[in-house]
Structure formats: structure tokens, C-alpha cells
Amino acid sequence: MTKISRDTSLCVLACVGAALSSAPLRAAEPAELKDETGKTIIRYVVEPPAGIAPAGTTDPARQVGLFLCFPEHDTPVDADIFPAREALWRLGLRDGYVLLAGGPQAQKFGLADMEPIEKLIAWAKKTYPINPRRIYMFGKGEGGKISAEFTMTHPNIVTAAITHSWGFWVMPSELQEPIDPLNSAPEVYMNLGLRDLATHLTTVRDTYPRVKAKGYHVIYREFEDMGSRSYYPPSNDDSVAWATRLRNKTVPPSAEESKILNSFGSGVAPAPAGGYFAGLALVGGAPAGAVLQELFDAKDANVRAAAAETCSRALFGDATLASLAKLTADPSANVRQAAIRALGVTANWRYQSAQKALIQLATDKAADADDRLSATDALGQAVKLQVKGVRQDPPMFQALVSLLADKDERIRSSASAILAPVYHPADATPPLKAPAGWLAAMARRDYNQRGRLYERLRSLRRPRPAGTRRSVLQRRSRSAEGSSVGIQIHAASR
């Protein structure tokens, strides 16, 4: 063997060895968290990143976030670590998070699991350098249920929840004060695969309007080619990217985080690295957003552009988005383009200030043509996971449909490409619906309006013998928008 080939072989072996040592190859055996008497509190599996700092570390750049992953009933404790882990790898974020799975007290998760999970989180905070503003939950089926229910009832602990394949019911009662989705309430990202079980479809679809009516900021996605597993990279990457940009709204920045914010005082901003302010993106949330709002008014266009670009890297609250929207009229083209890009990122996650700003710019025929084109592209990014699923935000689609007749050919072509999965122009081969007819069809297909899949499920139900009890009860309800919708309520067992 030549020296070159031998060195190459050794390099390949080293790379393979590094890869194998950095990621688990099989399910781990659960450990047990025990109380002082030796009684088991909860079974768990933990995957800390390599090279993690010691517990008690206060430097925000060396602290890590925590993803709690909960499984479906009758599956291994760590069954749903894999989708979260792989999403973090793909996003380049794996080194910044501890993955922690917990098992149920019985076959399924319920109220009896609330206290053990709280103790598991407390143990993680003592064992690893967890930043308390960066704690998230991810779960499938019963694991999704407990993720959402624990998150909504413990907003002082958990920032956001990602759920798959099942609904949830336990929410705050609002007896003392209403839910404040902007300033204190956690947020929820719901996923449903249309190849999942029929009872899962109806249960998740029943849950969404209830959660929305409570006032939570909820992202709801349906995917035609997604099955019953929580592993689905398009959804995993989008939901994990969203969650990791959020910070707990009820936990104030630490002393070390406050030092980062204070370094921007007196109108002086540290030089941006990589075109954005990494320190503000690290701190995140409304406190860092307040600093960004001041930077949006800086005299230096480079500072304004970096501040706008920072809004693509983290989420800073509605007030910051409203201020960011004003930069779409900035004298500097670089600032305007950075603002449009950031608005596109946040509009995808259903933040209304971002969506309204993009719609206004894209449809404003007096605005700069290149800015309008960029805003159209940003709307395309914002609807990419809605266009063939649940269209939660009709105003964006209405704007895109109107752009199909725009005088600017680039804008017309962009809008047509964005809507191509579900729309063909009237002069297409073969000719199909015109824009106005397509928009009406779009509204009818929303699952709230008994869309095609719902009707298909009803047609497949077998007749029941006379006198037998229904396993699925039907009732009429009203959506948050006030329209009559058909909802199926699943019986106690599934």
C-alpha cells in the first residue's frame, strides 16, 4: 500500500470512528430517577452533547437547551429522541441541546406524570448547564399529549411544545386572567400525517380549533405523505428550527444575558459577526427585541441591516416584528432586503405582523419592483407547508392569487410557481380553474369545512347494526372564525 493510500484509509477510518462515537446506534436502556428513599420517580434516557460544559455554567454561550422527548404508549422510552436529534443535526444545532426522554407512570401519560416530569426537569438542570429559557417538549401520540398539556400548565418551565398524531385536553382554566399569547403563554406546533389512523385524524382535528379558540399561538400542519411516525424531516426541521428560536416568556434573562444586552447601551453597538448580532440572537425573546428596536433606528445602514438580519436567527416578539416591518421602507436597499428575508422566516411560523407586512409590500404597485418581488418570494416561503395542507392564513393566499394578474412578469411568474402545487392557470394544458374559482376551492378544502379527506372517511364507515352504540359521536361546533364545522369526538379508548 502506498503512503498516500494508507494515509487516506486512516483518514476515512478516523472520520467513521468519529461519526460512530458522536451518535447512538441503538436504543439505550432507560435509567431510573429515584427519590431519597430509593423509590423510582421516572424512567429516562438522556443524550447530552459531546464536550458539554459542567453543571452550573453561567456563560450563555456555553449553556445548552433541553429537549424533552416523550413516546407513544407501548413504545421504548427513547423512541422519539431520534426525530429531534436528527433535526438538530441537520440544522447544525446538535451540540447546543441535551435530549431527555421520559417514560409514563402507567401505560399512557396522564395527570400522574406531571410531578415526575417536573422532577426530571429539575434533575436535568442540576446535572447539565441548562439555560432555563430554552426548554422545549417533543412527543408523539400520548407523548405529544403530555408534551402539550405539561407545557400549557407549566409556562414558567417550558417554552414550547411540538406534538404529533394525537390531541390534548388539559389546559389552564382562565378563571383569574385570560391567556396572553404575546407576553406569557407558551406556543404549540401541531403535526398530523394524513396516512395516520382515522381516529388520530379526527382527534387532532378536534384539538386544533379548541386550542386556537383558547388564544394560543398554534402552528398546525397536515402532510399528505406523512404516516403515523413522528419522524418526518420536513416537519421536524421546521418545528425544531421554530422552537429553538423561542425563549421562555416568563423567565427573565440571567445576569450574564443581561450583560450582553447592556453591552448595546448608550447607542453603541458591538460589531456584528457574520452580518448579524449573535449575542442578541443567543439571548432572544422580547428583552433582546427591545434592543433591536433601538438598532433599527441607528444612523449606520450597516447596523440597521445587521439588526434586521438578526431577526432571521431568533424570535423577539410581536413588538419587534412590527418595528422590523417599518424597515421595508428604509432608504437602504440592503436594509430592506434583510428585513424582507426576516419577515419571510417569521411569517412561515404564523406571526401576523410579519404576514401583514409582506402582503402590503407585495401588493403595493407603487413600491420598488425588486422589493415587491422579494416580498412575493418571502410569501412563498411562508406558505410552503400550507399550500397542500391546512391553509391557516388565507390572506397570504389571497395576496398570491391577486399577484397572478400583476403587470410585472417576474411577480406573476413567482406567484404562479408558488401556487403551482394546487393551481393551474386557465390557459394551461389541460385548462383548469381560473384564479377566483381556485381561491373558492381553496377555502372549501380547509379541513374545518369538511374537506375531501373528511368526506372520504365518512364514506368508508361501515353501517352499524341497529341498536349498537356509536364509537364515534358527531356533533356540530363553531370554529374560531364563526363558521359551522363538522367535528368528530373520539370515544374514551382508541
Image: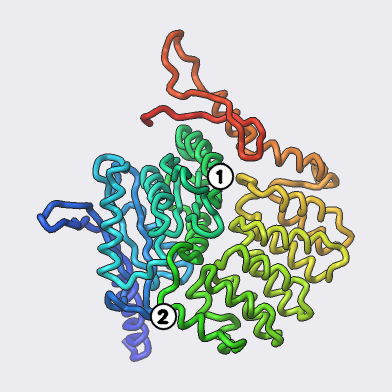
Q: Quadrant of the C terminus?
A: top left
Instruction: Mark 1: give few (<14), some (14-19) or many (20+) Cα within 10 Å.
Output: some
Residue for badge 1: 212
Q: Residue furthest front?
A: 176
Q: Residue at x 40, y 72 (%)?
A: 96
Q: Residue at x 41, y 52 (%)?
A: 151
Task: Give me the C-alpha separation between circle 1 and circle 2.
Answer: 36 Å
Say whether marks 1 and 2 touch (CB < 8 Å). no
| Mark closer to the chain start, 1 or 2 | 1
Q: Quadrant of the N terminus?
A: bottom left
Q: Residue furthest bottom?
A: 3
Measuring from the top left, give residue 433's x and y in whole percent: 80, 41
At numbered mark 2, what does the secondary structure look like: helix, strand or loop?
Answer: helix
Measuring from the top left, give residue 245's x and y in whole percent: 51, 66
Q: Amino acid at mark 2?
A: Glu
Is residue 51 visible in the rendered image? The answer is: no
At numbered mark 1, what does the secondary structure look like: helix, strand or loop?
Answer: helix
Instruction: Mark 2: give few (<14), some (14-19) or many (20+) Cα within 10 Å.
Output: some
Which residue is nearer to you in this view: 435 or 195? 435
Residue for badge 2: 256
Displayed quadrant of residue 37? bottom left
Q: Residue at x 57, y 23 (%)?
A: 459
**Number of marks in picture:** 2
Measuring from the top left, give residue 288's x and y in whole percent: 54, 74
Left or right: 72 as drawn, with respect to 106: right
Q: Residue furthest left?
A: 37
Q: Is residue 323 positioned above or below 406 on the image? A: below
Q: Amino acid at mark 1?
A: Lys
Q: Which mark is on residue 485?
A: none
Measuring from the top left, give residue 74's x and y in whole percent: 29, 42
